[in-house]
Amino acid sequence: MAIKRLQNIAYRISLSWWMFLIPSLAALAIAALTVNVHAVRAAIANPVKGLKCE
């Protein structure tokens, strides 16, 4: 019954596969960039300076 109601809606849109692929790839790219930036910062940081603070 709910499916028949949805088919009669005046303003319907069609969803394509690329509408899910592009945001997924964008989120994955942002996550990878964030992890890489933190990894590079940790690799460059001076461990002696970090130990002095603790």
Image: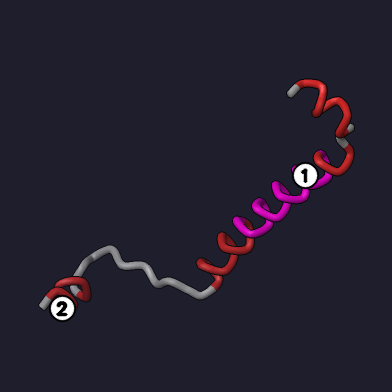
Label 1 Cα crowd, 10 Å radius (few <14 / some 14-19 / many 20+):
few
- Horizontal and vertical percent position of residue 15: 43, 71
Judge from the rendering whether residue 26 lies leftward or rightward of residue 13; answer left or right.
right
Q: Residue 44 appears in which quarter of the rendering?
A: top right
Q: Which residue is mark 2?
A: 4
Q: Residue at x 63, y 57 (%)?
A: 26
| Above or below 7: residue 9 | above
Could you say which is closer to the camera, residue 20 or residue 49?
49
Query: In the image, 52: left or right of 22?
Result: right
Instruction: Say few, some or many: other residues with alpha carbon within 10 Å of mark 2 (under 14 / 14 to 19 / 20 or more).
Output: few
34 and 42: which one is in front?
Answer: 42
Mark 2 falls on what kind of element? helix
Question: In this figure, which colouring scheme has been used for the structure?
Answer: secondary structure
Q: Earlier in the sequence, mark 1 or mark 2?
A: 2
Residue type highlighted by circle 1: Val
Residue 30 falls within the magenta-colored stretch: yes
| Residue occupying image coordinates x 31% and y 67% | 12
Q: Mark on residue 37?
A: 1
Quadrant housing residue 38:
top right
In the image, is 20 to the left or to the right of 6? right
**Gap between marks 1 and 2 measured at Cα:** 50 Å
Residue at the spot 18% in from the left edge and 77% down from the top edge:
3
Element class at badge 1? helix
What secondary structure do most residues of the magenta stretch adopt? helix
The residue segment tinted magenta is 27-41
**Residue 17 located within the stretch drawn in magenta:** no
Q: Residue furthest left?
A: 1
Q: What's the amino acid at mark 2?
A: Lys
| 50 shown above or below 37 | above
Q: Nearer the viewer, residue 17 or 27?
A: 27
Residue 34 drawn above or below residue 11? above
